[in-house]
Amino acid sequence: MSKPAAQLKGRAGRLARLMPSGPSNAARTPFVLLVVLLLGGGLITLLLLNSALNEGSFRLSELRRETTELTDEQQALQRDVDGYSQPDALERRARELGMVPGGSPAFLDPDGTVRGVPAEVTAEPSPPPEPTPGTGEPGTPAAPSDSASPGATPHPPGSARPEPGTENAPPTAATPSPTPTSPGR
């Protein structure tokens, strides 16, 4: 030990013995600065990483919400498509467009012979809803009767009959071709 530390008594002497003397303090300064810089850099890196994770978490929750909304919209559109593709909805929409069910088809065989009797189909105007018996409210339209009305011209079987008073009406543009060319059925 050095002489000045031995001369001090009590508390000051003990502190003097704990403190190293000489050039060893200068060697520790770069090491301490390096440790402080590494700890500071680590804390800044950790802060940036935490911020990036939080931003990603917010983006993920936003994308999940958007996915849920789009899935709901897709399901609603699918329900609409299913509703529009039901047979009764298709028939109703076709009638609104002036289309009529096809008559008896005729087919051409490969040798050129015609199989079946083609029939021209005309559009029937849809009857207004009639009141249902006992309620007086409009219900479903009554089915057309099978008996011929007086003065009506006979029609080939399987073809639609026009309403009374429309026998001489010109055919509509929705009249199908009388001879389809589908092979043998």
Image (cartoon, grey):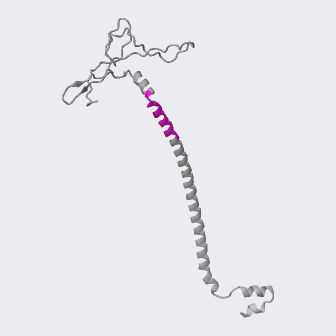
Q: Quadrant of residue 5?
A: bottom right
**Residue at screen point 47% across, 37% down:** 78
**Residue at screen point 40% across, 15% down:** 125
Figure disc tally: 0
Please, what is the dominant secondary structure of the magenta stretch?
Answer: helix
Residue furthest right as drawn: 10
**Residue at screen point 55% across, 58% down:** 52
Task: Tell me if residue 170 comes above or below residue 3 in the rendering.
Answer: above
Looking at the image, residue 110 sits to the left or right of residue 90; the answer is: left
Q: Looking at the figure, which quarter contains the C terminus?
A: top left
Magenta part of the protein: which range?
Answer: 72-87
Q: Quadrant of residue 26?
A: bottom right
Residue 43 position in % (x across, y down): 60, 66
**Residue at screen point 56% across, 58% down:** 53
Q: Nearer the viewer, residue 135 or 61?
A: 135
Residue 28 position in % (x across, y down): 62, 81
Q: Nearer the viewer, residue 43 or 7?
A: 43
Looking at the image, residue 38 sits to the left or right of residue 114; the answer is: right
Q: Looking at the figure, which quarter contains the N terminus?
A: bottom right
- Check residue 73 for magenta coloring: yes
Q: Quadrant of residue 21?
A: bottom right
Task: Tell me if residue 80 comes above or below residue 10 in the rendering.
Answer: above
Looking at the image, residue 15 sits to the left or right of residue 129; the answer is: right
- Check residue 4 for magenta coloring: no
Residue 165 position in % (x across, y down): 37, 8
Residue 120 position in % (x across, y down): 30, 18
